[in-house]
Amino acid sequence: MECKTAKNSQNCTCSYDGCSRRGLCCECVAYHRSKKELPGCFFPSQAEKTWDRSIDNFISSYKK
């Protein structure tokens, strides 16, 4: 399977531009899973900008 890093990066909604995993979705998901978090692309725009990737923040952002 070929990684489509360039295409993924164009659609990445993560606001942390300095991330070395930008566009590498499998690495991003693995990184956040290891920290018991979710990637930024799972969050609505305003919640993503807080950089709080916790599951609690994910749940509360969709409850509103």
Image (cartoon, rainbow, N blue to C red):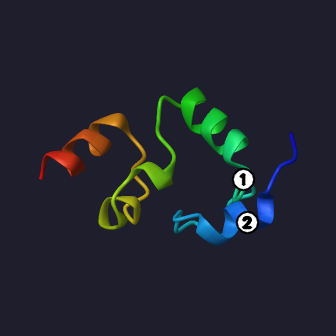
Within 10 Å of disc 2 (Cα), the crowding (few <14, some 14-19, many 20+) is: few
Identify the residue at the far front of this view: 1
Residue 18 in sight from this viewpoint: no
Q: Which mark is residue 12?
A: none
Secondary structure of the residue carrying tag 1 is: loop
The amino acid type of the residue labelled 2 equals: Lys
Q: How many marks?
A: 2
x then y, percent, for residue 4: 79, 56
At horizontal 35% and vertical 35% (from top left) the residue drawn is: 55
Cβ atoms under marks 1 and 2 closer than 8 Å: no
At horizontal 28% and vertical 36% (from top left) the residue drawn is: 56
Question: What residue is pinned by disc 2?
Answer: 7
Vertical position of residue 17 compared to residue 36: above or below:
below
Vertical position of residue 18 compared to residue 4: above or below:
below
x then y, percent, for residue 25: 67, 47
x then y, percent, for residue 63: 14, 45
Closer to the camera in the image, 8 or 19 = 8
Question: What residue is pinned by disc 1?
Answer: 21
Vertical position of residue 2 compared to residue 31: above or below:
below
- Side of 42 where 27 appears, left or right: right
Instruction: Say which label, 1 or 2, has the lower sequence index.
Output: 2
At horizontal 31% and vertical 43% (from top left) the residue drawn is: 58
